[in-house]
Image (tube, rainbow, N blue to C red):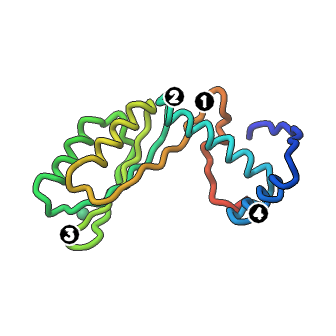
Amino acid sequence: MAKLVRFGVAMEDGLLREFDKYLRRKGYRNRSEAIRDLARNAMVQEAWEQEKGEVIAAVALVYDHEKRGLADRLTDLQHHAIPMIVSTLHVHLDEQHCLEVIVLRGKASSVRKFANNLLAIKGVLHGGIVATGVPSTKISTESIAFEPKGRK
Ligand code: NI
């Protein structure tokens, strides 16, 4: 486990009160854990927005598998991006609809482009992207362990 370093944070009392309310709403047990998560999120967000560094992203999309050519198109795109694809989960939602969750890992710019291409396929009814971080020399290995809150 990475070494923890303590540091002091000065904050206006009103801001701190609001921050503590936020922590309770989110289920945090202490400020340190919340500040760590905010720091990680900020860096992942920066990598994603600036399209720099490596990211892991989960792309979830719902589509109509009866729509002609759509399932083939989705499969075809993925077969042309094998190095980026970590895993794919397919769920048959009902007789007509499928949910696919595709986990991607790679350069932020490539992952973002590919994820957007998937979502832009005609016939994809709904979808979204969740981007998360990959450890680098600056961020400790701990930073990818996005554990459910309240486990520690
Ligand atoms: Ni299906």
Q: CA distance from mark 1 to mark 4?
A: 32 Å
Q: Horizontally, is 41 left or right of 6 in the view?
A: left
Q: Amino acid at mark 3?
A: Gln
Is disc 1 in contact with disc 2, using a CB cutoff of under 8 Å? yes
Residue 25 % position (x, y):
70, 65
Residue 136 is labelled as 1
**Mark 1 or mark 2, earlier in chain:** 2
The residue at the point 89 percent across, 40 percent down is: 8
| Snapshot quadrant of residue 11 | top right
Image quarter (top left, top right, bottom left or bottom right) of the C terminus: bottom right
The residue at the point 25 percent across, 60 percent down is: 63
Question: For numbered disc 2, what is the local secondary structure?
Answer: loop
Q: Amino acid at mark 2?
A: Gly
Task: Rate crowding at label 3 as few (under 14), some (14 to 19) or many (20 or more) other CA atoms within 10 Å.
Answer: few
| Snapshot quadrant of residue 29 | bottom right
- Mark 3 highlights which residue? 96
Is disc 2 in contact with disc 4, using a CB cutoff of under 8 Å? no
Is disc 3 in contact with disc 4, using a CB cutoff of under 8 Å? no
Up the image or down, 35 lies above or below 7; here it is: below
**Mark 1 or mark 4, earlier in chain:** 4
Image quarter (top left, top right, bottom left or bottom right) of the N terminus: top right
Q: Amino acid at mark 1?
A: Ser
- View quadrant of ligand 1: bottom left
Residue 109 % position (x, y):
41, 31
**Mark 2 or mark 3, earlier in chain:** 2
**Mark 3 or mark 4, earlier in chain:** 4
Q: Is mark 2 within 8 Å of ligand 1?
A: no
- Mark 4 highlights which residue? 21
**Mark 2 or mark 4, earlier in chain:** 4
Question: For numbered disc 1, what is the local secondary structure?
Answer: loop
Residue 16 % position (x, y):
83, 53
Q: Amino acid at mark 4?
A: Lys
